[in-house]
Amino acid sequence: MLTKDALHLLRKSPPFSSLDDAALTGMLQDLQMVFHPKGHTILRQDGPAPEYLSIIVSGEVKIFVRTHEGEEVFVDSRTSGDSFGLLSMVCGDISRDTIVAVHDTSCYQIRRENLLPVLRTHAEFAEFFFRSMLKRLLDLTYREICDRTLLYGGGDKLLFTNILGDLATSKVITASEDISIKEAADMMAGHKISSLVLLDSDGLPSGMITDTDFRTKVVSKGRDISGRVGDIMSSALIKSEARDYCFEALIKMIRYNIHHLLVVGKGELKGIITSHDLMMLQGTSPLSVAREIEGQDTIDGLVPVSRKINRIITMLIREGAKASTISRIITEINDRLLKRILEITETKLGRPPLSYCWIVYGSEGRKEQTFRTDQDNAIIYEDQEGGVDDAGEYFSEFAGRMKDALSRCGFPPCKADYMASNPQWRQPLGVWKRYFAGWINTPTPEAILQSLVFFDFRPIHGNLLLAERLRAYLGHEIRDKGLFFAHMAAVVGKNRPPLDFLGKIACERKGDFKGTFNIKINGLSPIIDSVRLSALEAKVYHTSTLERLMELKDRQGTPQDGAGDLEHAFEFLMSLRIRHQYRQLQEGKEPDNHIDPRDLGSLERALLKEAFKLILSVQEATSKKYGALPVL
């Protein structure tokens, strides 16, 4: 049973997935499973070398090395499906690093004498391990060089490897919300802290008071300092789990424009983290860019700040951040930039005559932006019998100014004119409902195209309730619309992954992109389209592909029954695309989506083929479920 379970795990985990069953079975002779409690040191640097390779079944480990000066340098973290101990095992003398269980961790142990023959006889399998070891050694050398220069802040990777529980201030100063403002100020001054957590009568956190609150609510207003501090506290407490990584806190601080974040574990207050803590942890800071955006009052002031966003992407790529992490951080910053542009434009033009909501769609709506993409936006404004002409005139001017401002900040106009500057895409809520109903009930090729574009919409600014009312209408209108789903399913099967009948990657045979394939059209789009279809039918209202997949994991009867595998495939393809475009920008080229397989390593090509095979299986399952229609 142990060997059977291990085979099931390893068949899905590179590079073991590249081995045939005979090699895997031979390797797993005398397999053992061990348990390491949280905090246990599994291997110690300069201690005995292990006699086995460990494969993590569940849990997480951190890997450190100790310098001659006694400083511990973080190397990596590993989770389920990852392995550790290979280098020390192969060398056979001493352990090269220290490995500690972050959580309770279970591992399979593959004996040295069973693994070494497979490394000798399976070149691709061995290449994976030795390339990863070489990369780690190069990364350590690069980091050491970077840490010695004043031009680089080497702490950014810590955002993705340090958990909040390790960084947050463990002792949180608290006080009753019923004390006076003066007493609260005295406590903060005495403890030399910038924030004070306030408790209700039950001893539970009810709010927070910060230095900013004293400046804006007390000093500037001439407020009586004998008054109750609970009357000026910020009652909307934003929290994060102690087990979350620091980048999660970064995203929340950017999103909610806050400087302090409570850290909780198992429902209890564990500490507090500030923007200063993250700034100290980082070098180039996404937080500092977000703050700089907030401090601008003109479009001219935003233009140079917007140019820094691509630098953040570059920094995140260099630090090995996952593609989904890059997209999430960039989405938060781009949203902040867009909101500020909207606020400045609204101030210049004056108060709108009707309540409105600015929405985005496409990759921006799905939170899948990386390097700058085209403008994809629209306006929904409230229905009103009178004054519609005035509203139309106002929003026409507003949308035109937004188009120009966004272009200046690096977002080129959409070539297909899916922008609010097009009168078709700035309409009252009632018109938008008629648009959606028409596309669903009369699924012509043009209607399906509009659905693919607009059904990923996401509200950014204004009266967000207008967008939510439109989403609710979409959920109601789309119920039991089998013909519409069938036409959407035909689109899912339209763009096939570039595999020939021999299972090799097929590339363009002529033209400017000869020898390449389009990773967006033939890799990412089929996943995006199939997941959108299942999400709409299953009433999943997320717009992000990965968020949709997370919720579809527990749903039965969808083509995404293997949502976990599809999630990994999407992440892998996004990573290839981002790094391809990054290299092009470094070479001074315009980024595109055309990848040459010859630029990939043998393992990347193998993973790419597996991802394409998975997409094909999803397309076939979709076609089988919804029936065969002519491809639109």
Image (spheres, helix red, strand yellow):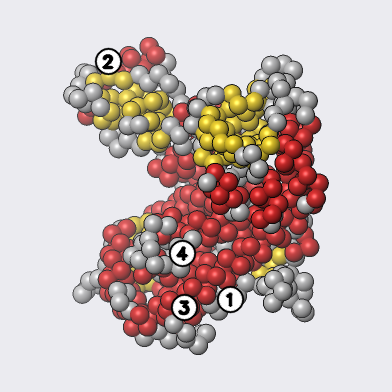
Of tags 1 and 4, the one toward the viewer is: 4
Name the N-terminal-most of marks 3 and 4: 4
Q: Amino acid at mark 4?
A: Gln
Mark 1 → mark 2, Cα distance in angstroms: 66 Å
Mark 3 → mark 1, Cα distance in angstroms: 16 Å
Query: Which residue is disc 1 drawn over?
Result: 495
Query: Which residue is disc 2 drawn over?
Result: 183
What secondary structure is found at the residue carrying circle 3? helix
Query: Which residue is disc 3 drawn over?
Result: 624
Name the N-terminal-most of marks 2 and 3: 2
Q: Position of residue 367 (x, y in %)?
A: 48, 57
Of tags 4 and 2, the one toward the viewer is: 4
Of tags 2 and 3, the one toward the viewer is: 3
Name the N-terminal-most of marks 1 and 4: 1
Mark 4 → mark 2, Cα distance in angstroms: 57 Å
Q: Are marks 3 and 4 in contact (CB under 8 Å)?
A: no
Q: Position of residue 374 (x, y in %)?
A: 55, 65
Q: Amino acid at mark 2?
A: Glu
x 56%, y 74%: residue: 415
Name the N-terminal-most of marks 4 and 2: 2
Q: Amino acid at mark 3?
A: Lys
Q: Which mark is residue 560?
A: 4
